Image (cartoon, grey):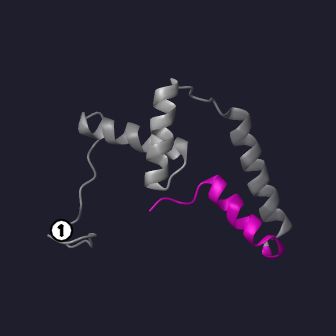
Amino acid sequence: MTSPDTATLLEDAADRIADISRPDLQIMLRRAALRLRNAGGISMDDDVEEALRDLAGEFGMTRNDTIRFIVREWMEKNLYLPVHHLEEDGDVDGSA
């Protein structure tokens, strides 16, 4: 599992603002400011934006996370990235 992204950390901090130390809050806010400053938006055609919103809602993800997911899946399927392999003894969801 990956570490939580900056937005998740900020949302968590907002939910428990009284428990967050000032230095931790400063670090999170500086990270957020840096990400905003360096953010380069990707604009899509209206029909693609609508499909992304629908898909993001289905996945329970943000628009940007959905785009990252789609690009990674496409790159793995087209062999631009190595495919994630499951360990033989590892846990899996579902049943066969």
Please name the residue shown 77% across and 56% down the image: 27
- Magenta-tinted stretch: 1-19
Please name the residue shown 50% across and 46% down the image: 65
Nearer to us in this view, 54 or 84: 54
Query: Does the magenta segment cover residue 35?
Result: no
Please name the residue shown 28% across and 52% down the image: 84
Nearer to us in this view, 82 or 46: 46
Q: As shown in the figure, which amino acid type bears the numbered disc 1?
A: Glu
Q: Is residue 6 above or below residue 53?
A: below
**In the image as oriented, which residue stretches furthest toward the left?**
96
Q: Quadrant of residue 92?
A: bottom left
Q: Residue 56, position in %: x, y?
A: 48, 47
Nearer to us in this view, 15 or 3: 15
Q: Taking 43 as reference, is 22 left or right?
A: right
> What residue is shown with label 1?
88
Q: Quadrant of residue 39?
A: top right
Q: Quadrant of residue 77?
A: top left
Q: Is residue 40 above or below residue 54?
A: above
Q: Residue 25, position in %: x, y?
A: 80, 61
Q: Is residue 30 above or below residue 91?
A: above
Quick one: SS at disc 1? Answer: loop
Tag count in the figure?
1
Q: Quadrant of the N terminus?
A: bottom left
Q: Residue 51, position in %: x, y?
A: 45, 37
Q: Quadrant of the C terminus?
A: bottom left
